Image (spheres, helix red, strand yellow):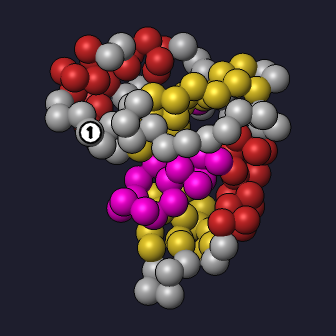
């Protein structure tokens, strides 16, 4: 487990770099945090770190956004609007999880029963001063 304290969005590059140095063969990363905590901002830094030219947007309405970088694809999922694991299965969530591409999943607790044992969890906690504490676990 590793903790980071972040005061600005630009500082997210520190935990992103650390993540990529330590994630080994894991490709599923669950992002946990309240609305507005910075989950999509974290993915934006990931995309920048991977040197992708794709523009990152929140997948709140599309549910799944796909981004491309030199070594492959990254899926950014936001399951907030789904009501059940059945809805996730109906959109083909298992195919995305099994594809071995990077998957960043917001509100992943909805699909907890079908997540593989080997995933990384990043919890983003908003602090009283509006800074963020990131807790990276399951490495």
Q: Is residue 107 above or below residue 34?
A: above
Q: Which residues are magenta?
A: 27-44
Q: In this rendering, is residue 47 above or below 14?
A: above
**Local SS, label 1:** loop
Residue pictured at 47% horizontal, 18% vertical: 96
Q: Position of residue 136 (x, y in %)?
A: 55, 55
Name the quadrant containing residue 7. Answer: bottom right
Going by the image, does 4 lie left or right of 70? left
| Position of residue 134 in the picture relative to residue 123 (left or right) | right
Give the residue drawn at x 53%, y 72%. 132
Q: Is residue 28 highlighted in magenta? A: yes
Task: Name the residue at 50% across, 81% down.
Answer: 130
Residue 127 x %, y % = 46, 80
Instruction: Give 8 or 120, whichever is nearer the viewer.
Output: 8
Residue 51: x, y in percent? 82, 37
Q: Outermost residue, bottom direction? A: 129
- Please give the residue where the numbered disc 1 appears in the rendered image: 81
Q: Is residue 108 visible?
A: no
Q: Position of residue 22 (x, y in %)?
A: 70, 45
**Quadrant into which the N terminus falls:** bottom right
The quarter of the image holding the C terminus is top right
Say few, some or many: other residues with alpha carbon within 10 Å of mark 1 (under 14 / 14 to 19 / 20 or more). few
Up the image or down, 118 lies above or below 126; here it is above
Residue at position x 17%, y 30% from top? 84
Relative to 12, is 30 above or below? above
């Amino acid at each position: 487990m590793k903790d980071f304290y972040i005061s600005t969005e630009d500082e997210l590059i520190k935990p992103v770099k650390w993540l990529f140095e330590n994630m080994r063969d894991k490709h599923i990363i669950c992002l946990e945090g309240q609305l507005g905590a910075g989950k999509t901002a974290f993915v934006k830094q990931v995309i920048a770190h991977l040197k992708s030219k794709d523009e990152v947007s929140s997948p709140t309405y599309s549910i799944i956004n796909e981004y491309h970088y030199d070594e492959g694809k990254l899926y950014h999922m936001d399951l907030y609007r789904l009501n059940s694991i059945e809805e996730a299965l109906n959109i083909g969530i298992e195919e995305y999880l099994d594809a071995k591409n990077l998957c960043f999943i917001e509100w992943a607790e909805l699909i907890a029963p079908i997540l593989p044992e080997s995933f990384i969890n990043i919890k983003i906690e908003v602090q009283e001063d509006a800074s963020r504490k990131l807790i990276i676990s399951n490495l």
